[in-house]
Image (cartoon, rainbow, N blue to C red):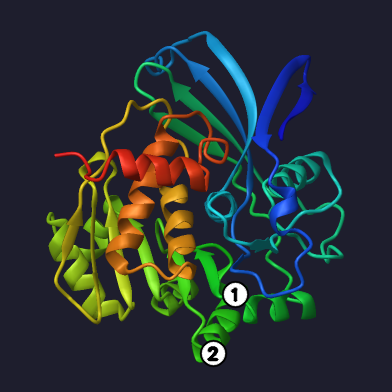
Amino acid sequence: MDGNLNEVCRGVKITCSWTDFSSNHMQQSHPFDIVGFGVATLDVIAEVEQFPASGGKTKILSREFHGGGLTATALVAASKLGASCWYGGAMGENDTSHQVRRILTGYGIALPAVSPYPPTAEPFAATVYLEKNTGERTILWSEFLPPPPILNQEAVETALAAKCLFADQFFAETLNPLYRQARSRKIPIVGDFEFVSSHDEEEALTLIDHLIIPWSFARVRGKTDDPATAVRTLLETQGNTVLVVTDGTNGAWYASQDDQTVRHCKAFDVQVCDTTGCGDVFHGAYAAALVFGKSLDERVRYASAAAALKATKKGGQTGAPTEKELNEFLEECPEGKT
């Protein structure tokens, strides 16, 4: 069923809407498909007709609360496609945490039975400025990191029983021991890294089995202006099992250790409304396709289609497609953009 979360913030009514998937996975006793501990955010999306010049002013057309964050949005995308997901990141007893918790559980994301976090713990808060004319966005986020994940008995047991772990670059110092255990148990890790800035993040990146990174990062890290060359170079130097480089409307390039031939998946041609969360949805759909047993070519195409559909709707999590929507889209659009 459809639900609405209405909040009043400084006298402005802000609405976040989602489809209730809570009955899908919340009460299961068997292991989850995908488990993650990375970033969750509460995004305030402010829509403007056109971004103003530096120092200028412009009218806000609308303002809404949406759930966001690399890991949280990926898990929501996977859940909407039928994967069972569990999130163990920091949430306490405060307004931001309550809203993120309600949004995630509304999408069927399971949370710890008893929260191990202090009441003051809260997810990131971010403001997203969305340009109506182009669908492009500018993101401003708080500089204060939430507390790192608490890996108590429930968290570790849940993670090591999962079919797949999902990782972003945050909290690597805390999570690397868990990633090492997962690798030793042959539990695949899908990773969303936009940068690395520490030794721990460098180690985390090499522990990822299925690494999906944006072209902006791959270009710098691979020291090349050619995406295919970046895939080959990084696959060889980092040792990931699969490496995917995404570049929006230009598509995605990918290869694996089993077949190092770099392939290209064309982007799907859609009417863009909002690009917020497209990369996160790509990651979540890829992880879902992985646990569903799809081949590498199928996983990348599935993820590309999911990201394209998300771009047609506002909000990272609200815009992620359902399994039915994605399957229908793939039937109607067997090929990507030429």
Q: Nearer the viewer, residue 333 or 85?
A: 333
Quadrant of the frame with the N terminus: top right
Element class at badge 2: loop
Q: Which residue does the image show at 59% across and 69% down from the upper left?
A: 33
Kind of residue at disc 1: Leu
- Residue 74 is situated, as x and y percent measured from the top left of the image, at 52, 53
Query: Residue at the bottom extreme?
Result: 184
Residue 229: quarter of image:
bottom left
- Residue 299 is situated, as x and y percent measured from the top left of the image, at 35, 61
Kind of residue at disc 2: Arg
- Residue 250 is situated, as x and y percent measured from the top left of the image, at 21, 43
User: Which of the numbered marks, if any, corresponds to residue 185?
Assistant: 2
Q: Is residue 239 above or below residue 321?
A: below
- Residue 128 is situated, as x and y percent measured from the top left of the image, at 53, 31
Q: Which residue does the image show at 54% across and 62% down from the upper left?
A: 170
Would residue 298 appear left or right of 199 to someone viewing this image?
Answer: left
Pointer 1 local density, CA inside 10 Å: few below 14, some 14–19, many at least 20: many
Q: Nearer the viewer, residue 225 or 284?
A: 284
Would residue 49 appear left or right of 173 to someone viewing this image?
Answer: left
